[in-house]
Every structure is written in structure tokens, then in C-alpha cells.
């Protein structure tokens, strides 16, 4: 290992305080390459554009999520899980690459392609005797999909689509996916992917462990939940978020990105409430499909030996701070839901330690008794599954394109904006001000905190190889 790489790894460990329906290719016919005994299965359910604060059991009283609520009671919820950010407007591309490789933002992918030398989590499990299954949204390159999975159902390669006419291809073990094999799905996307997962769980033989990855494309817009679910939410009864603004107070460099054009400027209370109602309806409908998948797992007899993970790829503003998208570093856009349940995991527990979604890779390796590949940069939080109160990471670094940089601790967040020739600084006391409303950066008594966080930010940038290092 080079001296520079060793130094970076040492920094990351110090900063992290490392702790212990559709036609479906049959998985039953594929033989495991390595005998693994009774290792647990893994079911990873992944949502699209779902912010951390949209689960009833975790504090959102306006939304109905009975199946996720049951999962919360069964496991440990990480209430301050984050993504590291994004190097493009389609934040879910790097987010998914970070999840799958355990690598940090500037080292995980190139233009959506996961580099061949970076062993993905499903690829690693497949190499260790797991049957690996996928049905849902991929949004990365086809070669990495092919080397990662044994079998699967319908795959959506795009970023967003009409949920009633999602363009999909059936899993192809050759990895070719010619255009003439594409088809339009005949049911709502969440139902399509859940159907495939249910079929897999019903048909899988229990003598070989499985990794089943079900990445939904909900609640990503277009927000078009079935009418039964839309009727559950009356926009007139929904409270506005406490940090609602008609417009952001200054230019963050993405005023005209697609997500921000889903609602007119200035934002109005009625428009925001309507979008929130539709957003919640999408999540509740997806929750129902998750319930079907979890019921199939219970019926399979494998539930007691399966680690179930629910997570999201990034958050979404939907009216907070005058924004609608995820192209920013406020908590509503970088914090994501993360719940783990299963053997060896504390039930009905909360951990408010900071962690990254990319930390899930080494965590699962530790839980499964597997070595973590040396390409993985994440830090296992497996110890928190038994001791939720311990600290995993004292701070996290956040980045969005070459426009925004941030560092967040348990108490404070510093965000630096570089837009054209303008520079803006925000400092929030996120313990006292979780909605990030009051900027403390100009207060004289905060000068020491500001200087300390700027130093931490610079250290993160240097050790992560940030291509944009500024004074």
C-alpha cells in the first residue's frame, strides 16, 4: 500500500471511529461456487428520492407506512444516515455506486460506470456462494450489473419514467441487453418489482444463501400514486415544513435543474402541500408493496435467517428552503432512511450516530462473517447493531458537484457555496435548529466553531482527493 493511500485510510478510520410476474431468470438452477453453511440471507429494499423524515414510526405523523413501521420495531434504525453527496444532478447515480462499492464519492464511478476493479457487494457475495438477485432500478452500467448478479427479474436502466409504463428489460445473464428486447411494463413500477421479488422468495431453495436487491423507482416523480393512495392525503390538512420559503435566499447554482422546475417560482403553500400529498401517497403505495415482499419472506421460512435492510438513495426538498430537488447539502436532501433487522440486530432500537450509506457494505460483510474487500472505503457500523448508542463517525463530509461543500458533526453543519464569483457560508446548530433555518456564520461568538469546521472540511477534502479544493 502506498504511503498516501495508507495516510488516507488512517484518516478515514480516525474520522469514522471504526466499529466492530415478468419473466424471471431462475436462480434455483445456479450452483454456488463456495459452500458457506448457514450464513444469513440479505434482502435489501431500496427507495428512490425518499428523505429520512418520511416514516411514521420515526416521527412523520402525517404519513402512513405500516410495513416500514413494523420493520422499525423489528430492527435498528439509523436516524442520521447520510449519503456523501453527488457529482452530478442525477444524485442517485453516484449514490447507488457508493452503496454498491463502499467507495467514497470521488473514487466510486466514472460517468455512471462502476469500475471493474471495484468489487460490488453483490459480486463479492456471489463469489462467496450467494445467489444474487435483482429486480428494479439499476441506473449504473450494464457490465457491473452482469458481474454482480446470478439472476433477476425486470430491470429499469433509466433514472425516471411513467410508473405505469416503465421501460424494462428482463434480466439477461449474458449482460447484453439489446434494445430490441426492451418492453413496457404492464403494471405500476413498485408492483412490478415487488412481484418479481415475491416470485424469487417463493421459488428459492433454502440450502443456498441469497442476496436479493429490490431497488424501487418510487417515490421519484412523476408522483402518480394509484387513486386509492392519493385519496388518503388531503393537501389542505398537511402542515407546511417549518423551513418553507417561497425561494431560496441566494443562488445555489441549480435554480433551473429539472427537479427545481417541478413547481413554479415563487413556491406557494398550496403547491407545496399538493406535492407533499402526492409524495406521501407514493411512499404509502411503495410501503404496501414492501409489505408483500416481507410477507413472502415470512412465508418462505427464511425470515429468521435473513438480514432485511431498508434504505434510500437520497432525500428531497419538496418545498423546504424554497427548493424541490436533491441538488443541495441540507439534511432533507443528504439524510436517508436506513433500517436493519434480523439475526443479531437489536429490536426497536434507534442509533443517532452519523454514518454513511456506503458504510453498509463493510457492515454486511462483518455480519455475514466475510472479509471486506480492500477496495472498500466504508467503515463497518456492525457494533451499533448491538450497541446503538456508541459513536460511529464524529463527522461526515458532504459535496455537491463543484458548487457546494459541507462538514457535519452531531451539533453543527458548515456549508460553503461557490457559485460563479460568489461565495456564501452557512453555519447551523443542527441540534437546536434541525430545520436549518438560522445561519450563525456571521456571529462573532461562532468564529471558533467556524474555523474548526473549516479545518475539518479541508482535511476531508485533502484525504478524499476532492478535485475542488479551495481556501
Image (cartoon, rainbow, N blue to C red):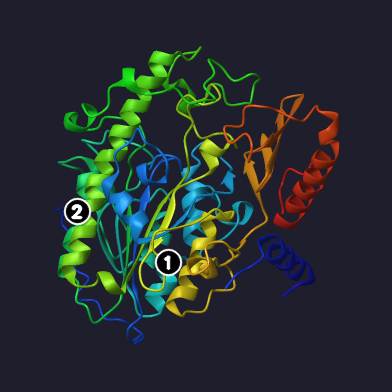
Tell me, yes or no, if residue 94 can be seen here. Answer: yes
Q: What residue lies at 26% left-to-right and 51% top-to-bottom?
A: 290
Q: What residue lies at 84% left-to-right and 33% top-to-bottom?
A: 445
- Total numbered labels: 2
* Secondary structure found at label 2: helix
Q: Nearer the viewer, residue 461 or 266?
A: 266
User: Where 382 falls versus 71 (above or below)?
Assistant: below
Residue 292's label in the rendered image is: 2
Q: Is residue 430 left or right of residue 224?
A: right
- Residue 130 in picture, x, y percent from top left: 34, 76
Quadrant for the C terminus, please. Answer: top right
- Residue 293 in picture, x, y percent from top left: 22, 56
Front of the two marks 1 and 2: 1
Query: Dot 1 corresponds to which residue?
Result: 346
Q: What residue lies at 46% left-to-right and 69% top-to-bottom?
A: 364
Of pointers 1 and 2, the one earlier in the residue sequence: 2
Tell me, yes or no, if residue 119 can be seen here. Answer: no
Find residue 405 and report its image quarter: top right
- Residue 414 in picture, x, y percent from top left: 71, 39
Quadrant for the N terminus, please. Answer: bottom right
Q: Nearer the viewer, residue 163 or 431?
A: 431
Q: Is residue 281 left or right of residue 353?
A: left
Q: Is residue 299 left or right of residue 36?
A: left
Q: What residue lies at 79% left-to-right and 71% top-to-bottom?
A: 3
* Secondary structure found at label 1: loop
User: Where 2 falls versus 32 (above or below)?
Assistant: above
Amino acid at each position: 500500500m502506498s504511503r498516501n493511500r495508507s495516510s488516507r485510510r488512517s484518516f478515514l478510520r480516525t474520522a469514522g471511529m471504526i466499529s466492530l410476474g415478468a419473466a424471471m431468470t431462475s436462480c434455483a438452477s445456479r450452483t454456488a461456487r463456495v459452500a458457506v453453511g448457514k450464513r444469513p440471507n440479505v434482502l435489501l429494499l431500496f427507495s428512490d428520492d425518499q428523505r429520512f423524515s418520511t416514516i411514521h414510526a420515526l416521527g412523520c405523523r402525517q404519513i402512513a407506512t405500516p410495513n416500514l413501521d413494523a420493520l422499525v420495531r423489528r430492527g435498528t434504525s439509523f436516524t442520521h444516515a447520510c449519503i456523501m453527496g453527488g457529482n452530478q444532478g442525477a444524485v442517485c447515480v453516484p449514490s447507488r455506486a457508493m452503496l454498491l462499492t463502499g467507495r467514497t464519492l470521488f473514487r466510486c464511478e466514472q460517468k455512471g460506470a462502476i469500475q471493474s476493479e471495484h468489487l460490488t457487494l453483490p459480486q463479492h457475495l456471489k463469489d462467496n456462494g450467494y445467489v444474487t438477485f435483482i429486480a428494479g432500478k439499476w441506473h449504473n452500467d450494464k457490465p457491473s450489473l452482469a458481474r454482480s448478479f446470478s439472476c433477476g427479474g425486470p430491470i429499469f436502466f433509466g433514472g425516471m419514467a411513467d410508473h405505469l409504463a416503465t421501460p424494462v428489460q428482463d434480466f439477461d445473464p449474458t449482460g447484453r441487453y439489446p434494445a430490441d428486447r426492451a418492453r413496457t411494463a404492464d403494471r405500476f413500477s413498485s408492483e412490478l418489482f415487488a412481484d418479481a421479488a415475491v416470485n424469487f422468495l417463493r421459488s428459492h431453495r433454502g440450502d443456498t444463501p441469497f442476496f436479493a436487491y429490490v431497488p424501487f423507482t418510487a417515490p421519484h416523480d412523476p408522483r402518480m400514486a394509484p387513486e386509492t393512495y392519493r385519496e388518503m392525503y388531503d393537501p389542505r390538512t398537511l402542515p407546511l415544513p417549518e423551513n418553507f420559503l417561497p425561494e431560496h435566499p441566494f443562488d445555489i447554482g441549480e435554480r433551473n435543474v429539472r427537479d427545481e422546475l417541478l413547481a413554479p417560482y415563487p413556491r406557494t403553500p398550496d403547491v407545496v402541500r399538493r406535492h407533499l400529498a402526492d409524495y406521501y401517497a407514493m411512499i404509502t403505495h411503495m410501503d404496501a408493496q414492501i409489505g408483500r415482499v416481507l410477507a413472502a419472506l415470512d412465508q418462505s421460512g427464511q425470515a429468521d435467517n435473513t438480514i432485511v435492510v431498508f434504505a434510500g438513495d437520497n432525500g428531497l426538498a419538496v418545498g423546504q428552503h424554497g427548493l424541490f430537488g436533491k441538488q443541495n447539502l441540507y439534511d432533507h436532501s443528504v439524510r436517508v432512511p436506513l433500517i436493519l433487522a434480523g439475526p443479531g440486530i437489536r429490536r426497536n432500537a434507534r442509533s443517532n450516530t452519523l454514518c454513511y450509506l456506503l458504510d453498509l457494505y463493510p457492515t454486511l460483510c462483518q455480519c455475514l462473517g466475510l472479509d471486506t474487500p480492500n477496495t472498500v472505503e466504508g467503515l463497518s457500523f456492525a457494533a451499533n447493531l448491538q450497541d446503538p448508542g456508541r459513536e460511529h463517525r464524529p463527522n461526515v463530509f458532504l459535496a455537491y458537484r463543484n458548487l457546494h461543500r459541507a462538514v457535519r458533526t452531531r451539533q453543527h453543519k458548515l456549508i460553503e457555496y461557490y457559485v460563479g464569483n460568489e461565495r456564501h457560508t452557512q453555519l447551523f446548530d443542527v441540534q437546536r435548529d434541525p430545520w436549518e433555518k438560522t445561519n450563525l456564520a456571521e456571529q462573532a461568538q461562532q468564529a471558533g466553531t467556524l474555523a474548526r469546521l473549516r479545518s475539518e472540511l479541508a482535511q476531508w477534502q485533502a484525504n478524499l482527493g476532492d478535485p475542488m479544493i479551495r481556501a
